[in-house]
Image: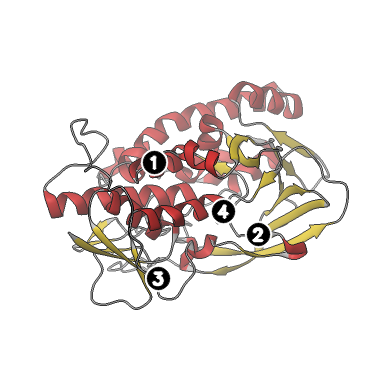
Amino acid sequence: MSVVVRGATLAGMATAARLARLGHDVTLVTDGEPLGGRWAPAPGPGGHTVDAMPQVICLPATWRDLFKKSGGHLQAELNRAGLDLVPAPPALHRFADGTDLELPSERGTQLRAVEHAFGPDIAARWRRLIDGLDDVWLAYRRHALEGTAPVAGKPDMARLWLDRTLGGLASGLGERLGRVVTDLGDSPGAPGLLAIRLHVEQTFGRWQLVDGDGVPQPVSRPIDMLTDRLQERGVSLVETPDGTPDVDCLPHLPRGTWLRPAPGAAPAPRITHQLREPSGEGVREVVDHTGPRPVVTWLRPTVDGDLATTHDHNAAKPDAAWGVATSSARDWLARTPILGDGHLRASACSPAGAEPWAELASAALAVYELHERLTGEDSRPTNRDFRPPRLPRHGVYHQ
């Protein structure tokens, strides 16, 4: 069955690959944009390849699921590319008073680091915050990540911490640790749900790609592997749209709301090559909280120094490719639904969010819905009886 996916975004690529594996004849409309969208790799200083993607991978299970559901296994693809996925060093948080906090992702180690830096009382408050996010994650999965259940009433709002703010969660943590929380959103008034990133990193870890010599590699490499997967699955690439797509994976701001949320903030990127002895410890993430908004720098060791990729949120510009600005619970509730007004949409503007893993999740939800509409088959992971069609011996690629 022929289907059309529009958008050269990560969500568009993932949607096309999944649908092709399910036996559909898929056309991906790129509008002349490079595959990967905002995450597409580009030439950088010193002949290095750089990209706007965060240089630490979180929730790698979404990548594993994508490659499995598109006809292979992530580890096999990594092996073929001479790559491996290994733990990344802890993030380093830098504060205005000149102090630093190294925040490991493992729960016990993280709590000990917080207690050592700020004392037992603040560590106990931090533990309550982190423990409370366990239940928020379950609700978030149901409403945004693995399902599309509507948020119905105050109980659902409470379970998602949409009735709380990041500023409220930061209260009692002190000025420094409080900034770690409030800088997760656009403002202290942003919904507490956005603190879910703390749960993701602590539960699923922080990972980096390395080559056979252990040298960290750009995390855009999976986009290259996904491009190969599109070819293997016989996905056709065209530049010009023809009619309404079956799945729209271009980022769109919410429609039909009386107060339209603003586009997400695209941080000003800076790519530099620091010619000095490389750190040799893997991809180092430094979060500078000394200004009004955070400045995040990833230092990736190369043979002749560290390649620094910086996202300066103080100089951010509105761009829907980075999702929907979420300064309140109302903004989050207005995000573009996967299933809305009869159309299927998957992008950084979905309720799942703008992280790479969130884009992949929105694509999976759109594919489950479209495949069921077209065939009557339920391909969701909850349907353990579903079996995809057999793969052909060779994919056909149409340019």
Residue at point 56% right, 51% down? 221
Q: Position of residue 156 (x, y in %)?
A: 31, 40
Which is nearer the eye, 329 or 103?
A: 103
Mark 3–mark 4 CB contact (< 8 Å): no
First of labels 1, 2 by sequence position: 2
Number of residues whose C-alpha sits closer than 10 Å to that of mark 2, classed few (under 14), some (14–19) or many (20 or more):
many
Amino acid of disc 3: Thr
Mark 1–mark 3 CB contact (< 8 Å): no
First of labels 4, 2 by sequence position: 2
Task: Say whether residue 359 is visible.
Answer: yes
Residue at point 27% right, 46% down? 148
Label 2 sits on a secondary structure element that is strand
Q: Which is more foreground, mark 1 or mark 3?
A: 1
- Left or right? Give the position of 273 relative to 395: right
From the viewer's perspective, is residue 324 above or below residue 80?
A: below
Mark 1–mark 4 CB contact (< 8 Å): no
Label 1 sits on a secondary structure element that is loop
Which is nearer the eye, 98 or 83?
A: 83
Which residue does the numbered mark 1 point to in the structure image?
72
Which residue does the numbered mark 2 point to in the structure image?
50
- Left or right? Give the position of 225 relative to 25: right
Q: Position of residue 91 (x, y in %)?
A: 68, 39
Mark pair 1, 3: CA separation? 24 Å
First of labels 3, 4 by sequence position: 3
As drawn, the label of residue 220 is 4
Which residue does the numbered mark 3 point to in the structure image?
30
- Left or right? Give the position of 52 relative to 285: left
Mark pair 4, 2: CA separation? 8 Å
Mark 3–mark 2 CB contact (< 8 Å): no
Amino acid of disc 2: Val
